[in-house]
Each structure stands twice: as structure tokens, then as C-alpha cells.
Image (spheres, rainbow, N blue to C red):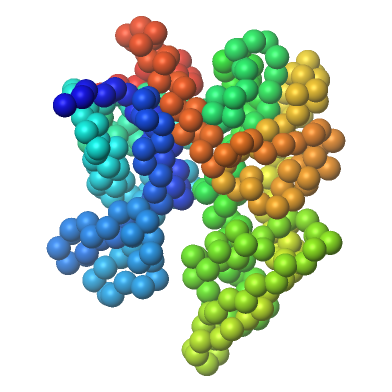
Amino acid sequence: MQLFSNDLGVDLGTSNVRIYEKKHGIVVNEPSVVALDKNTGRILEVGAAARNMMGRTPGNVVAMHPLKDGVISDHEMTVRMLQAFFRDAAKSKRIFTPKPRVVICVPSGITEVEERTVINAAIEAGARRVYLIEEPLAAALGAGLDISGPNGHMVVNIGGGTTDVAVLTLNGVASSSSIKVAGDSFDEAIGRYVRRRHGVVIGQTTAEDIKIKIGCVMEHTDVITMTIRGRDAKSGMPKDLPLTSTEIAEVLFRPARQIAEEVLSVLENTSPELVNDISENGIVLTGGGSQLRGMDKLLSERTGILCSVADDPASCIAYGCGKSLGWISKMQEGPINIARNRIMRG
């Protein structure tokens, strides 16, 4: 039986978890959702199967996201979710002996307490040693940017719970910011609008479906229409409702503008030399939220700098974690970390 690498790169996202293994690329790509039987404490489903149960469970079952706004909100459920995903990564004759070393991405604004929670969760789930890397740095690596030299690059990673904005140079973060406005914020805005404007209650899954199919942050000449089904807020009966991309654009513009303002704020706190580099290199958008129609155009208009969406933006962080695996063996024992000059290990 063949022995495979012990190193894993983990994109521990609010909405999805992706795990990268050196020789096989992304081996796990699942929603970060856990379904739990509250009576027995038994995990019923993890990942896509658990996500399909959201809003459809009986009273004794709860389907939940154990992460919120980019950080762990339920430690035990996160551990059990990672245990399941580590087992999935070890399937198909992939055997990790000894326990794997793991690189996990974290938002740039994470606190030391939140860092320690991530580290402990990964160790309890079966990791031998844990290293942390900031999301923008992983995103830049995954997008194929050359950040090893003194030339400045800007990355805007729009995930599920947070948006991370960073200026990168010399394999490090020159300036950065993290805000809790991202994909989940877009979903929540759509849900609130549909109830307030049309008197129809919809779930998170439906709101996300609307965002993906007709969501945009700037009006387009081609108007897309979509019919959804929700619950009438007054009668409680099912109700069909047509929505257009034009009205959804008005809803999503506000959170998108908050992201644009944060990008401007980071640029204002960046040295003129690096800003000049960024104006020449452009701004790269990563993360699932960057695929929202018109997001790159909005940021281009607000900053005056050309913005582009990376190839496979949703997987950039996972690929970046994978590339950073090569740095582990070069690191010396002691207080050093991939992203912040601290090794975190169990």
C-alpha cells in the first residue's frame, strides 16, 4: 500500500472547507455544515449532505455552520467536522503516518485567542502540527502572483464570512484589513429585502441561490428574471415570487460599497511606492464572493485601478495553502509562523 504526504493545506472557510494534499490537489471540497442529533449528540451528516438538511430538520436535529465571520463559533462541532474531512482526505489509499502537518488559513484580523482556537481544533481533529497563514497571502499564492520581490500587489479576498484586503510584497503583508462583510452579508441582505418588500420569507439556501443566479452589484443592460418560492409572511402559505437582477443589484450595492470603501482605506494607509506598483499591476479578486457580477467593475470605478478576478477564485486559498506546504520543511523550530513569524505547533 502506497504512503502519501503527511502535509495538508486547509481552507477553513465560513461557507466551505477545502483541503489540499500535495500529490492530489484538492481532495475535499465541502460546505462547512454539520448536522447533529441533539438527543444523542451524534453527528448525522457533514458537508453537502448536512447542508441539504438546513431548514428541513425535525426538532431533535440541528444543521449548523460551526464557523461564523471567518472564525470558530462552536469548537466541538468544528473539531468533529475536521475529523470527518481529514478522514475523507485519507481515503482512496491515502494513508497519513504519522499524523499530518497542517497549514490553515485565517483572516488577517483574527485575534490571538481565535488563533489558538483554530490550532487546538485542528490538533484535536488529528493534526500533528499546525501552521497558520493569513488568507490574503494564501490567496495571492493561489492566484499565481509573484510576491517574492519588492513589487507591491493588492488582493481582495471575498469569502463567506469576511472580506480580507491586503497589500503584499517580499512574501509578506505590508498593510491589510478584514471586515465582516462578505458572501453571507449578501445573502442576509437578499433575505431581508424579499421579506420587507414582498412579504415573503425565504431561507438562507434560497437567498444564496438568488445571489448566484441573478445577483449583481451594478445594473446590466440584460435583465435576468428568476421565480422563487417562499412562505407568505401573512398567510403562512407557499408563494411564488418573480425577482429581477435590477432590484437585486440595488439590494447588493450597499454591502458591495462597504467592501469598496475598505479597499480605499487600505490604499490610503499604503506607501506611495506600493500604491504605484498596484496601479500598474492591478487589483486581484479572489474568494467565492468575487464572482458576483459587477464586483470587479465596481472596485475599478471606485479605486481607478484595473481589477480582475483570479482563475478559479473560490479555490485560490486552498491552492495557496498547498503552495505554502513547501515552506514548512524550511522553517526552524521556534516561534515562527508562515504568515506572522510564529510557528504554531501541537
User: Observer-nearest residue: 310 or 156?
Assistant: 310
Which image quarter is the C terminus in? top left
User: Observer-nearest residue: 10 or 261?
Assistant: 10
Q: Residue furthest front?
A: 1
Using the rendered view, name the quadrant where residue 105 is placed. top left
On screen, residue 252 versus residue 319, left or right, reads right
Residue 59 at x, y percent in the picture: 27, 74
Give the answer, above or below, for where 152 lies relative to 330.
Answer: below
Residue 324 at x, y percent in the picture: 45, 21
Q: Is residue 337 visible?
A: no
Residue drawn 70% across and 52% down?
Answer: 293
On screen, residue 211 versus residue 61, left or right, reads right
Q: Is residue 90 visible?
A: yes
On screen, residue 39 versus residue 32, left or right, reads left
Residue 297 at x, y percent in the picture: 78, 45
On screen, residue 246 versus residue 103, left or right, reads right
Residue drawn 66% across and 78% down?
Answer: 242
Give the answer, above or below, for where 25 lies relative to 246.
Answer: above
Residue 252 at x, y percent in the picture: 69, 59
